[in-house]
Amino acid sequence: MTNSISTRLAVLGSGPAGYTAAIYAARAGLSPVLIQGIVPGGQLTTTTDVENYPGFRDVIQGPWLMEEMQAQAEHVGTKVVWDHITSVDLSRRPFRLTGDGGTSYFADALVIATGAQAKWLGLPSEEHMKGRGASACATCDGFFYRGKKVAVIGGGNTAVEEAIYMTNHSQDVTLIHRRDSLRAEKILQDRLFANPHVKIIWNAEVAEFLSGGMPEALTGLQLKDTQTGALSKIEVEGAFVAIGHSPATELFKDQLELDKDGYIQVETGTTRTTIPGVFACGDVMDKIYRQAVTAAGTGCMAALDAEKFLAAQEYEALAAE
Ligand code: NAP
């Protein structure tokens, strides 16, 4: 027999956006059901030190922060379930979500907080050095590399912004790009070229992350010239891979309006998507800020927007009686 769960509000995703939406919705009396997805806790469970989430003087751990958010969401009345949603029907209300074990969730309103994943180069040595010199977020981890030589890999807006950002911490930043021109906006390129602390290596891709010492740490990168194939090395202690993100929107792509990069489109200044009753928050709709605290902020907005929507529905139903 397959299970069926009905709720006024379902929250899909268990990063800071999802948990914050659930906390606000639960405190508004909506008894939300939060479906965690394959990686409970989201991207923060794969980072270690977190030093920029307000409220904590000491460095905290990403997985711990997410456990606390889950505990808070449950404490105020959220039902948290572990399930992997494989299909969604947003064509009529209640919206229907189906889990891979066959459970159906019916929800009068839905908050989507499925997040995004940073893209990595896919090298085994990169995987090995994650958290030990290889990072996909300079804003999150850059502080740990102050005064050290660092590299940023990529040629889009994110890479250029991260290279410029890193000059707040380091006077020796190298941007490594696989072509001889950047994809980033001209204004960002102008700022980058004018920054005396950034060098650029053109036509190069990273062949290997080099490491040594005890405890093991990043010592440099082996580069391959994309035109000649020649190998070279640079010494760096931090390498930030900034080659884009993939929002987790596969489930919604034929139902909601997405932008050219696959992010869910929301009405400016709100979390309302193109379907009334469906709201999006966090990295799945934000390709610019992508921080735990901004995700939490939009999670709060989504809960308030959903609450308002459900109240209006109730009022209309009462008026029709
Ligand atoms: P992006 O624009 O897709 O750029 C990715 C960069 O990484 C490209 O330069 C690409 O090289 C390079 N790259 C991709 N795969 C690679 C690989 N395997 N090896 C080496 N290099 C690789 O990604 P993004 O910079 O994260 O930006 C994503 C979207 O967010 C864009 O629409 C951007 O405008 C937006 N954004 C806006 C802001 C802002 O408005 N302030 C800030 C950040 C992002 P090629 O150029 O050779 O393809």
Image (cartoon, grey):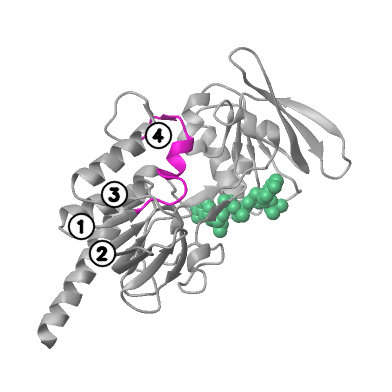
Q: Which residue appears at 67% of the width and 42% of the height? A: 121
Give how far across and how far down residue 272 sits, in percent.
34, 68
Asked if the residue at tag 3 contacts the one at tag 1, i.e. Cβ–Cβ closer than 8 Å, the answer is no
Residue 284 is situated, as x and y percent measured from the top left of the image, at 45, 57
- Of labels 1 and 2, earlier in sequence is 2
Q: 74 or 296, which lies in front? A: 74
Residues 30 and 188: in front is: 30
Q: Secondary structure at mark 3?
A: helix
Q: Pointer 2: what residue?
A: 7
In the rendered structure, find residue 20 and report the number of the disc placed on it. Answer: 3
Neighbours of disc 1 within 10 Å: few (<14), some (14-19), many (20+): some
Foreground tag (1 vs 3): 1
Type of amino acid under label 2: Thr
Q: Position of residue 62 (x, y in %)?
A: 40, 34
Examine the rendering and report whether any part of residue 78 can be seen: yes
First-in-chain label (4 vs 1): 1
257 to the left or right of 18: right
Q: Quadrant of the N terminus?
A: bottom left
User: Which numbered circle lies on residue 63?
Assistant: 4
Alpha-carbon distance for marks 2 and 4? Answer: 28 Å
Give the farthest residue toward the top: 214
Compare marks 2 and 4 and give the one earlier in the sequence. 2
Region in magenta: 35-53
**Residue 91 falls within the magenta-colored stretch:** no
Picture coordinates of residue 259, whole percent (x, y): 51, 67
Local SS, label 4: helix
Q: The residue under label 4 is which amino acid type?
A: Pro
Q: Where does label 1 land, which residue?
A: 31
